């Protein structure tokens, strides 16, 4: 096994070439970090509401695909859930996208409005729990201070004791509290209010239709068994007139999906992973970073092998095997991967902070992502080394000398 200093001396002989290689690897790492960071931020932000909802079982329309494309279903389905053993309480949740008028410049921007009965603990957010009594008042709302800045300096004004009044869907509302949920790719901002205030903002919504049904079970109840019982009871045959609007006419169908909390979260993630091009785009960006880094490292290692071909041929002539020389090149690739990764990691960490400040997306460096990119960088450099060493294998001392 050759010693590392030989590979190190090979790399450091041309310092400018080494710096160019490290810059190229660092750039490739930053590209992979940014793409993976955006992808993870997409999934994390898309399920922030789901994760903070307090419930054991969730009912959504069978035609719903994600929060940005929710379809309503009859509220009677939720109340039917009360008849099952183990069910303690049920709560309807209403979702709508309304135009918010910036109180500073009067410009409008769409945000998501979440409405529910203030008597129920729907969201596991301390700020919401402490302000449930406030949203019982007419036209009172709670504002997500992690919303994008285009909605105005609502959080700062409220903390300064100023009265914050504006319009949502052309209805006058007053902000009486703040909470933190965060913007997502589907909603730039969020608003929470009571179910009664929700219908005041959206008067065309039918009161008998809901978007999400939250079911809380008694202590010790078997969640999977309750879900199974509900699915069997709610199943509608294809000849039922309520089934005529659904797509799968050759199968039994139902007008609601019945999900556990984990399945409710996965329901949203699956949409963004499979039903949109966003996940594919970020994956392609990561692949492009990997390819760019591979090409850069290959060029550096190939040039290094070509410049020292005579020396390598001499080593072969005196008895060193191709395996020995291959290990030397792989050691160079490993050194490049580690040295190039360090600045890429540091710059990407700073870039995450900048992106989070500009977009309010939950993007941050994680141990898992840092490890994945490090392994990709090492693999990228080893592939480059394996390709570059082909010229070395073909080197014949008799031809060179």
Image: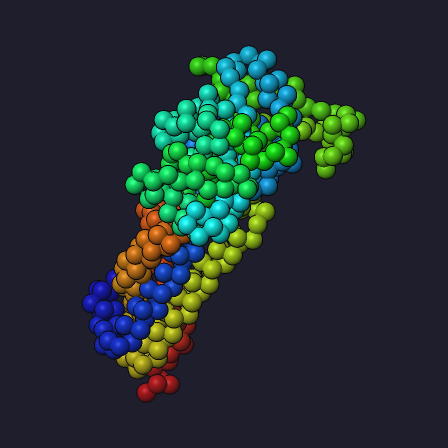
Residue at image position (37%, 78%) is: 395
Q: Residue at x 38, y 64 (%)?
A: 28
Q: Position of residue 219 (x, y in %)?
A: 44, 14
Give the residue at x 57% y 31%: 199
The reply to whether residue 354 is in sight is: yes
In the rendered view of the protein, which quadrant contains the C terminus?
A: bottom left
Q: Is 370 in front, or is 165?
A: 165
Q: Position of residue 57 (x, y in %)?
A: 52, 24
| Quadrant housing residue 84 | top right
Q: Is residue 96 left or right of residue 120?
A: right
Res 132 → quadrant = top left
In this view, the residue in front, 150 or 1, is: 150
Residue 318 figure quarter: bottom left
Q: Is residue 366 left or right of residue 90?
A: left
User: At 40% across and 57% down in the image, what residue appears?
Assistant: 34
Looking at the image, which is closer to me, 11 or 261? 261
The residue nearer to you, when weighing 174 against 236, is 174
Where residue 14 appears, as percent x and y from the top left, is 25, 78
């Amino acid at each position: 096994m050759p010693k590392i200093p030989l590979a190190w001396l090979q790399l450091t002989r041309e310092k400018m070439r080494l710096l160019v290689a490290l810059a190229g690897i660092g750039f490739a790492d930053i590209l992979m970090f940014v793409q993976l960071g955006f992808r993870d931020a997409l999934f994390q932000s898309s399920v922030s509401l789901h994760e903070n909802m307090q419930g054991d079982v969730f009912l959504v329309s069978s035609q719903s695909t994600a929060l940005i494309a929710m379809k309503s279903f009859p509220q009677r389905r939720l109340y039917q859930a009360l008849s099952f053993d183990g069910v303690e309480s049920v709560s309807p949740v209403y979702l709508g996208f309304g135009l918010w008028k910036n109180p500073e410049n009067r410009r409008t921007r769409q945000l998501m409005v979440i409405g529910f009965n203030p008597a129920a603990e729907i969201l596991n957010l301390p700020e919401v729990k402490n302000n449930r009594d406030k949203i019982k008042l007419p036209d009172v709302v709670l504002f997500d201070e992690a919303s994008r800045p285009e909605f105005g300096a609502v959080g700062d004004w409220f903390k300064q004791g100023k009265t914050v009044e504006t319009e949502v869907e052309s209805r006058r509302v007053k902000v009486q509290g703040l909470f933190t949920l965060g913007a997502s790719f589907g909603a730039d901002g969020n608003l929470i209010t009571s179910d009664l205030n929700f219908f005041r903002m959206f008067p065309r919504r039918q009161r008998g239709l809901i978007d999400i049904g939250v079911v809380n079970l008694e202590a010790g109840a078997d969640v999977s068994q309750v879900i199974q019982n509900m699915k069997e009871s709610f199943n509608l045959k294809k000849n039922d007139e309520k089934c005529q609007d659904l797509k799968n006419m050759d199968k039994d169908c139902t007008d609601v999906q019945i999900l556990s909390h984990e399945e409710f979260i996965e329901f949203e993630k699956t949409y963004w992973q499979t039903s949109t091009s966003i996940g594919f785009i970020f994956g392609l960006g990561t692949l492009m970073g990997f390819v760019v880094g591979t090409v850069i490292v290959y060029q550096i290692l190939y040039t290094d092998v070509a410049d020292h071909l005579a020396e390598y041929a001499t080593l072969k002539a005196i008895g060193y095997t191709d395996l020995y020389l291959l290990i030397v090149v792989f050691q160079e690739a490993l050194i490049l991967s580690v040295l190039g990764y360090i600045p890429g990691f540091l710059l990407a960490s700073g870039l995450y902070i900048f992106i989070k400040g500009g977009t309010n997306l939950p993007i941050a460096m994680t141990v898992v992502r840092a490890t994945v990119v490090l392994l990709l960088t090492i693999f990228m450099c080893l592939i480059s080394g394996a390709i570059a060493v082909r010229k070395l294998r073909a080197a014949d001392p008799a031809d060179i000398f």
